[in-house]
Structures are given as structure tokens and as C-alpha cells.
Image (tube, grey):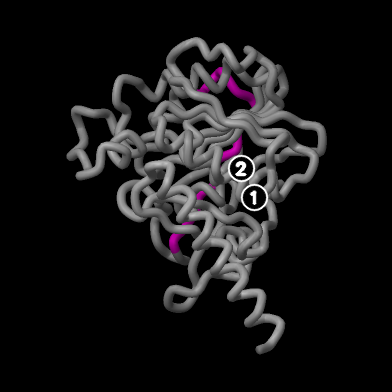
Amino acid sequence: MTPALVMSLKKRKSDEHFLKSLKSEGFGPLTIDDFLGGQVRLVQQKDGYRAGQDAVLLAAAIPARPGDAALDLGCGTGVISLCLARRCDGVSVAGVEIQDHFLRLGRKNIELNKLTGRVGFFAGSIDSTLPDIEIQSFDHVFANPPYLDEEDAIAPAKDDKKIAHVRVGTSLADWVNAALSYVKDKGTVSFIYRADHADELIGHLSGRLGEMVIFPLWPRAGTPAKRVIIQGRKGLAGTTTFAPGMCLHGEGERYTRQAEAVLREGHGITWP
């Protein structure tokens, strides 16, 4: 057997052992999925809510440096935090999650990626006091919040998927207020959000963040953006900038070179 095949078989055996141990702890059907070209590995449930490219794109936009502290609001199984920690060595990341099964899986993912000590996840809701998290103590706060109000949504079949996409018991203002409460002065606040609902988020952030950048994510050239990354700094003045954005796909379903560098190779997203 070739060395590559031997490594592949060892990886598969290790994955099977890890999944078997989680099954013995009462978890349902799970998969292990690669992000950043395998630099981050994520255990997530086979059915229900599953993390995707939005999380990786948001992680790539956080301008973190070694020694910085970052906070992930609604961390789920941890993919944004883990991608950020993998891309930016020396950055510590805390995450807050309300759903217990996601929190348990997130902690398993920290273990799987050997990031214990740099990444930690805590139970809590963004609209209440978090005893494990200090106010104004983070250089960067970020979130991929639910984008629909409960009365406007047709609930998905899985409850966890509903909470991921529909604001249950919270408002968008709660997410913005939490982010501004935990970030330091001059620290960044970053959201990824649906482009067709971006005006609502911008309205909550306007006048509260300076140097705000709106970065559209185009599915492909000539099509409307489906997502935007919105980032600004607390306590600073400055006008809002519309960045050129990024096209995700070129011919067919192939990623563009820029998207490939971010999603598969772990490069950051920057703008002027």
C-alpha cells in the first residue's frame, strides 16, 4: 500500500473509533466533515442543522492577530471558532451556545482538533447575562445569527434547524446588543447575514459602529448577492464602505480561485 493509502485507512479507523465513542455517550447519527481542506474536522449530526460555507467565510473575515481574544455568539458545533483558531495561531476563542447537544458536540470538536486551551464553549443565551463571559473583554465578536422572526417563518422539521434559522425568544436587536456589550472599544463586530435582509441589520448597527464595511458574497458573476458580511469597529467614527465582495462560483459549480483560497486553503478575507 502507498503511504497515502495507509494514512487514509488510519484516518478512517480513527474516525470510526471516535464516532463509536460518541454513540456510546448517547449521540445520534453523526458524520465527521472536513473544512479548510481538512485543516478543521467537524463532528456534526447527520440530520438536522449542519454547518456550511457561511461559517467558513465569516471566520475568514475576522481580522484577528496573535494574542487577541474573540467571542462567537451562537457557536453551534463550533466551526466558525475552530476555523478562526486554525487560521490565526495565538488567538483565543470563546463561544456561547444555548442548545445543549450542539454545545456537547462543539466541545468534542475542540478535542478532535486539538485546540483545548485556545477554544472554549459555554452554555448561555445571548439575551441574558453570561457568567463565564466578561463584558467588554473581546477584541472581536462575531455571529451568524438567525435571520427570520418566528412569526414570518415556516419552521423546519428539526427543532435545532429552526433555532439556527429562526429567532425564537430573541430579536436581531438582542444579537447586536450582545455583540456591542462584549466587544472592547475599537474592537470589531462582524455578522454574516442574508443580503435581502441586510437593511434591518444595518439599521441596528448604524451610529453604533464606525468604519463599517459591507462585503457582498455573490453566488456567481452577474447574480444578486445572497449573503453579506458586515463588519465595523466599536467606538470609532468613519463612513460606511461597500467593498467589491467575492464571487463564489465560476464555471459550473467550481469555486473561483479567490473562494477556493478562503474555503479550502484557509486564507483570510481582506478589503481596502
* Rendered view: 120 above or below 108: above
Q: Are marks 1 and 2 in contact (CB under 8 Å)?
A: yes
Secondary structure mostly taken by the magenta-highlighted segment of the chain: strand
Which residue bears the numbered disc 1? 113
Q: Which residues are magenta?
A: 205-219
Name the quadrant of the N terminus: bottom right
Displayed quadrant of residue 145: top left
Mark identifier at residue 110: 2
State the residue at coordinates (50%, 62%): 16
**Element under label 2?**
helix
- Left or right of 64? Residue 166 is left
**Mark 1 Cα-neighbour bin, 10 Å: few <14, some 14–19, many ≥20:** some
* Dot 2 alpha-carbon crowd within 10 angstroms: few under 14, some 14 to 19, many 20 or more: many
- Image spot of residue 99 (x, y percent): 39, 30
Q: Is residue 206 magenta?
A: yes
Residue 5 relative to residue 77: left or right: right
